[in-house]
Amino acid sequence: MKARVHVMLKDGVLDPQGEAVRHALGHLGFSGVEGVRQGKVIELDLAATDKAAAEVEVAQMCDKLLANTVIEKYTVEIV
Amino acid sequence: MKARVHVMLKDGVLDPQGEAVRHALGHLGFSGVEGVRQGKVIELDLAATDKAAAEVEVAQMCDKLLANTVIEKYTVEIV
């Protein structure tokens, strides 16, 4: 079973990496970009076969390792 | 209009960051993780209103800046 985790900075947390990308895109001539946020995507191959249990386990992985929940939010998707 | 870009290393390209995550998850007791690949997700706020044109423009951004197409693949999703 595969799981995909998205980790993004919470709204309101400054994202300097995204800002840098927005500036660079402007310099390259892409003028219609109003905002950029950059985050991580983590794809996991899991041995588990129970979808609900896998979702709970991946959420625990996020809380313990994959995301810094003080400033980041995550979403888990089983694919 | 919002666009979401996923940038992942191509299959076959070694992903040391993903491997490090896999090892760390193992040490934390998550034994059922068989593989991890880590990539970037970039969310763009666009002034464009034409979905097809926006998709083409974002693909150009990927080719020019957001992805290293020698070793990375990307997908563009208009949301």
Image: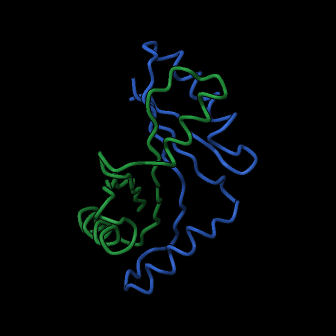
Chain colours: A green, B blue
Foreground of the two, A60 or A22: A22
Q: Residue sitting at 55 percent across and 42 percent down? A: A20
In the current view of this chain or complex, which residue is farthest to the right?
B70
Foreground of the two, A37 or A46: A37
In the current view of this chain or complex, which residue is farthest to the top?
B50
Give the image quarter of residue A44. bottom left
Residue B13 horizontal/vertical position (percent): 70, 60
Foreground of the two, A45 or B29: B29
- How many marks are shown on the rendered structure? 0
Q: Is residue A25 depicted above or below A77 in this figure? A: above
Give the image quarter of residue B74. top right
Give the image quarter of residue B46. top left
Q: Residue sitting at 38 percent across and 48 percent down? A: A14
Q: Residue sitting at 44 percent across and 87 percent down? A: B27
Figure quadrant of the N terminus of chain A: bottom left
Residue B53 horizontal/vertical position (percent): 54, 15
In-image side of B31 versus B65 (left or right): left
Residue A49 horizontal/vertical position (percent): 34, 67
Q: Residue sitting at 43 percent across and 60 percent down? A: A2
Residue B35 horizontal/vertical position (percent): 52, 69
In-image side of B72 versus A5 (left or right): right
Q: Is residue A76 depicted above or below A33 in this figure? A: below
